[in-house]
Structure formats: C-alpha cells, structure tokens
Amino acid sequence: MGRATTRVSMSHRVLSPSHNYTTKVDNLNDQPFVQLSGSIFGFLEEDTTILSSPESDIYSDIQLEVEEEDEENEKNEKVEDKVKFWETQHQNLHSTLFRTTSLESNIRSTTKEVLKEVEESENVCSCSRPISGGCRSCRMREVCRRLQNSGYNSAICKSKWKSSSDIPSGEHTFVDVIDNSNVKKGEVRVIIELEFRGQFEMKKGSEEYNGLVSKLPDVFVGKIERLQSVIKILSNAAKKCMKEKKMHLGPWRKQRYLEAKWLRVIERTTSMPSIKPLPVDNYSTHPARTKARASMLTMDLLESLPMMTNYFAPAVEVL
C-alpha cells in the first residue's frame, strides 16, 4: 500500500529559518512555499536600531526646540495681549472723561471755584473741625449751596443698598444736579463726587492699574452715563489686575457695588443750613471763656482788660 499524502495549507505551515522549503510541489495548483530567512527578524532588529540611532536623537532635539518655541510664542502673545488691554483701557478712559457737554463744563467750573475758595480761606469748616479746607460733608454743603445760588437744582444725595449674594451692604453721600432745561433731552442728572479717585485706589494694585487710576480726576463732574462708563472701565481693570496677581477681587471693587454708590439714591436733600464758619482765632483750642461777675475789684483792671481775652468782666467805678 502506498502512503497517503496529507496537504497542509499555507496558513498552517510552520515557518522555520532552518527548514528546507525547496522540495517539489505536489500540485501546480498549490501556492508555492514562501522561503523566509531571518529577514523578518532582521527587520525588527533594524527597526529597534533606528529608534536609538543619531538621527532619532536629532529628531528629539528638533521636537524639543519646537515645544520651546511654542512656549515662547505663547508667552509673547500673553505679554502682547496684556499691553494691548491696558492701552485700550487708557484710551477708553481718556475719551470718556474728555467728552463733555456745556452743562457739565459749567457745573464743573462752579464746583472748582467753590473748592478753591474753601481751601484758600482761613476758616475751619462749619462743623468746627480743624481740617484744612474743611471736611467732606461741609465742602459738599458749600458746593451744593453755591450751585443753588447759581440757579441749579442741586442737592446732597444719600444712597443706600442692602447686601446680596455678590456684594455687601453700604451707603454713600454725594452732590448731584438735576437739569430739565432741555425739553428734547428730558431730565439730565449730573453727579458731583469730591473724592472720586479715592473710590478706586488699591494698595495692592499693579503698576498698570495704579497708572490708570492716576488718570482719574479727584473731583468728578459728569452725567450718569459717563459715570457708568468710567465705572465699567475701572472695574474691568481691577478684575484683570487681581487675575494677573492671582488674588481675590474684593466685592467692593465690583461694578455692581460701585454703581450702587451713585445710583441707588434713597434721600435727596435740597435745604442747606446756613452756618457761618468760625474764625480760627476763636476756635475751641483756646481755654474756655468764663463770665465774671461785676465787682469793684475789677476797676484796677480796666486798663488791662483788653489784653485779657479769656475773661469778660465789666468794670465798676466807685463813687
């Protein structure tokens, strides 16, 4: 009996580098055997060698340089964005403050004249406080009175607001003028803040922020719309400043809190008490004056009485 021959398909044949695949093909229809040497394994070895070759080291260096360039470009873009932001804020603030109407200019001129007179006078404020140029309350009253004398509907306003989820409660006083002379424009409200720059100053502010605040006037005179624009510019600048310094922004620096100072008015006082300022020489820093009784003993002091400013005693002549 002849031996039976078993065919093994190509996919099931074991390939070995040492096996002889030169045997005669049983059938022409069968696919020829593939002669494999160590080429496959050699390819794997070559691939491993390529990864550790000098060319691969150069590739790694190039990749590192690209990453460093990307980081540097990103830093430059951040610096450029920062510079552009602050330049924009300066431009917006300048254009907002220097656009003015005739009404605002006239009120501003009167306000500056009053403050100049108060500062140059040798009187303490009407509340008897020894403050150079008067305290803020007395200066507001004086400005309001002079504006009323000039024909303006001026008043001292008190704003007050309750705390909410993002801002604390507070109150503020300032001077305003309501004008109804232009029928087409309707009612126009002008805000007068005597310590405007101080409302935005920050001890921990950046150089860019403090430079922006320094452009603010110490005395602000402007319409509500102009004030709101200034508040928006400064609140955005404060937010940017604190973000750059990685610090928390105080709620009293937020736009809503700042707007509440001048918009949430609950009281408007137009009657100004006329209190004459006291002379500095008569201020209470001198010893208290005592009223003496009339006596014959004061006759000898008749000549010296004008020199004694702290005592008042009528002289009585003995007949």
Image (cartoon, grey):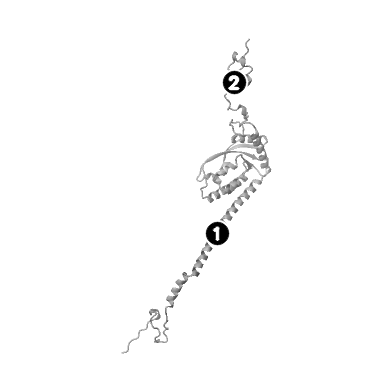
The residue under the point 62% across, 36% down is 155
For the C terminus, the quadrant is top right
Which mark is on residue 311? 2
The residue under the point 64% across, 48% down is 94
Image position of 72 with respect to 15: above or below: above
**Residue 153 versus residue 146: which sits nearer the camera?**
146
The residue under the point 55% across, 57% down is 75
Image position of 226 with respect to 32: above or below: above
Quadrant of residue 284 within the rendered picture: top right
Q: Are marks 2 and 1 in contact (CB under 8 Å)?
A: no
Identity of the residue furthest to the front in this view: 54
The residue under the point 57% across, 55% down is 79
**Residue 181 versus residue 63: which sits nearer the camera?**
63
Residue 55 placement, left or right of 197: left
- Residue 50 shows in the view: yes
Tell me the kind of residue under disc 2. Tyr
Question: Residue 187: where, in percent of width, then height?
Answer: 64, 42
What residue did someone put label 1 on?
72
Question: Residue 35: where, in percent of width, then height?
Answer: 42, 81
